[in-house]
Image: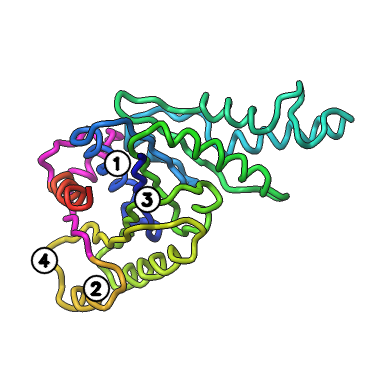
Amino acid sequence: MTTTIALAGKGGVGKTTIAGMVIKYLAQKQSGSILAIDADPSSNLNMVLGLDLDWTVGDIREDMLHQVKSSLTAGGAAMGVMPGGQSKREYLDYQIRSSLSEGARYDLIAMGRGEGSGCYCAVNHNLREVIDSMSKNYAFVVIDNEAGMEHLSRRTTRDVQHLLVVSDPTQRGLVAAQRVAEMSKELDINIENAYLIINRLPAEMHQALADFISTMDIPLLGVIPADSEITNFDFNGRPLVEINGNSPVCRAVSEMMDQIL
């Protein structure tokens, strides 16, 4: 059985950093293979994981649509197939598997840029089938989402066992996190557990912040302290998965993962 962990929250709260630390934890403390899905159009989870990224799902989708339109303009293949007789599903399956960035313990798929003009319903249906089929071969799937979650049900039909909603230590951040948690209930996929994570807490939590969290309809899983070592890694372009396992951020993420796994 595949365990799916998704991260969500407004931009700039450190979702990608935490996704990297979750993957580091899984690689070190859990058995089985790991698939990372970077669903943020900025596509920088590969830098956190130390993997090359040459081709995204967005690039593949746009290239496929361009080829189909060119073929139709030239009086070629019907909309259901690619030039040369290959079906769209077969084309997407081959291209996405070829775009997989492979590591020693984890692999990465990047969703890349958003959709352009035109209808993408049929393409997204095929993408869901391909990505869901690939995911079944992994023990864990970790999805780093963009700020909103509307796209999640368009990209996967997988149930999500653990949704980690990340916020910075501000009431504005917590309001955004509450909205994400509420939005998650409206998706076409089943989310079994949802948790709140406070990231980059500079010191002890202010009482007003703690009081606000107590009113939220999502349990607090844990707090991650601010850590200058993370900033140094980012500044020097070093993959965050190389950070020492005894760092405050790693220890905090490990404790939270121990709770839910």
Residue at 44% over, 66% down:
185
Q: Is residue 79 left or right of residue 47?
A: right
Q: In the rendered structure, which disc, 2 or 4, sits on the residue that comes first in sequence?
A: 4
- Image quarter where the N terminus lies is top left
Q: In the rendered structure, which disc, 4 or 1, sits on the residue that comes first in sequence?
A: 1
Q: Amino acid at mark 2?
A: Ile
Q: Amino acid at mark 3?
A: Ala
Q: Position of residue 176 (x, y in %)?
A: 38, 68
Q: Position of residue 187 (x, y in %)?
A: 49, 61
Q: Secondary structure at mark 3?
A: strand
Q: Amino acid at mark 1?
A: Gly
Mark 2 or 4, closer to the camera: 2
Residue to which mark 3 is pinned: 6
Q: In the rendered structure, which disc, 1 or 2, sits on the residue that comes first in sequence?
A: 1
Q: Secondary structure at mark 4?
A: loop
Front position in the image: 237 or 178: 178
Q: Secondary structure at mark 1?
A: helix
Badge 3 local density, few (<14 within 10 Å), some, or many (20+)? many
Residue to which mark 1 is pinned: 20
| Above or below, 166 relative to 50 | below
Residue to which mark 2 is pinned: 213
The span shown in magenta is 220-247
Q: CA distance from mark 1 to mark 3?
A: 12 Å
**Callout 1 touching callout 2 (CB < 8 Å):** no
Q: Position of residue 173 (x, y in %)?
A: 33, 67
Q: CA distance from mark 3 to mark 2?
A: 21 Å
Q: Amino acid at mark 4?
A: Glu
| Above or below, 115 relative to 177 | above
Q: Is residue 76 left or right of residue 83?
A: right
Q: In the rendered structure, which disc, 3 or 4, sits on the residue that comes first in sequence?
A: 3
Image quadrant in which you'd find residue 244: top left
